Image (tube, rainbow, N blue to C red):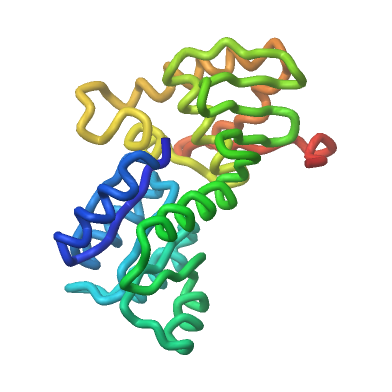
Amino acid sequence: MLKILLVEDDEILSDSILEILSETGEITQVYDGEEALYEGERGIYDLIVLDLMLPSLSGEQVLTALRKKNIYTPVLILTAKDGLEDKVNGFKNGGDDYLTKPFHREELLLRVQALARRALGMKGQNKLVVNELSLDLDNRQACFKNNELTLQGKEFDLLHYLMQNQGRIVTKDQLFDRIWGFQSDTTLTVVEVYMSNLRKNLKPLGIDRWIKTLRNVGYLFEVPEGLDHE
């Protein structure tokens, strides 16, 4: 399921958008620019729906700050500003799509789904593929060269998030917040435990080496040179 950050200061409209997108993913609502920047910097979201006219920091400032910090979470700009110059600036600042208010609920839903599929490398409706490793997100099944992998719930979630962020460093904090939730009663060491279990399950097929541990930094999911032919 997608993890979406919804940034909209109009609480009534925010709740309406929440209702529209509720079946698409897990939605976190924030209502001002400073909170949006804080949440965006955590790097745990698959998609950000971002209003431009916000208290404390504007949507443009939030987006620019995120991109300067090399956070490339896809952003759908949602705003009443419908001028051509506004749209051009939105894309120049790092936006990935632009939808003006008022909007049809069906268009919002389709744009979010399309942007998520494109950004996450999903082939078809609910399949994520990197090289010859694929995840069926509906059935929560992993396969490599037609060999099924036996993964427990959190192991599947770990692999899913690493594949989504192929080529990017993912910290333990990001994995913990994304998969267990920052309000979880467990501790950060649970990431290492499940990562070790995941590697053990990937090792028979030789794909455990696709996950690199960066000491005191985090993890990097990367297909070794010579194998990346997708």
Taking the spot 52% from the left edge, 20% from the top edge, the residue there is 139
Q: Position of residue 141 (x, y in %)?
A: 57, 19
Q: Is residue 123 above or below residue 132?
A: below
Residue extending furthest toward the left: 11
Q: Is residue 81 above or below residue 189?
A: below
Q: Position of residue 162 (x, y in %)?
A: 54, 35
Find residue 150 and report its image quarter.
top right
Q: Position of residue 181 (x, y in %)?
A: 28, 33
Q: Position of residue 197 (x, y in %)?
A: 51, 13
Q: Quadrant of the C terminus?
A: top right
Taking the spot 52% from the left edge, 31% from the top edge, the residue there is 160
Taking the spot 51% from the left edge, 17% from the top edge, the residue there is 196
Taking the spot 66% from the left edge, 38% from the top edge, the residue there is 222
Q: Is residue 203 left or right of residue 173?
A: right
Q: Quadrant of the N terminus?
A: top left
Q: Is residue 85 left or right of residue 136?
A: left
Q: Is residue 172 above or below residue 101?
A: above
Q: Is residue 208 left or right of residue 38?
A: right
Q: Is residue 160 left or right of residue 211?
A: left
Find residue 68 and report its image quarter.
bottom left
Q: How many marks?
A: 0
In the image, 213 versus 230, the foreground residue is 230
In the image, 104 versus 14, the foreground residue is 104
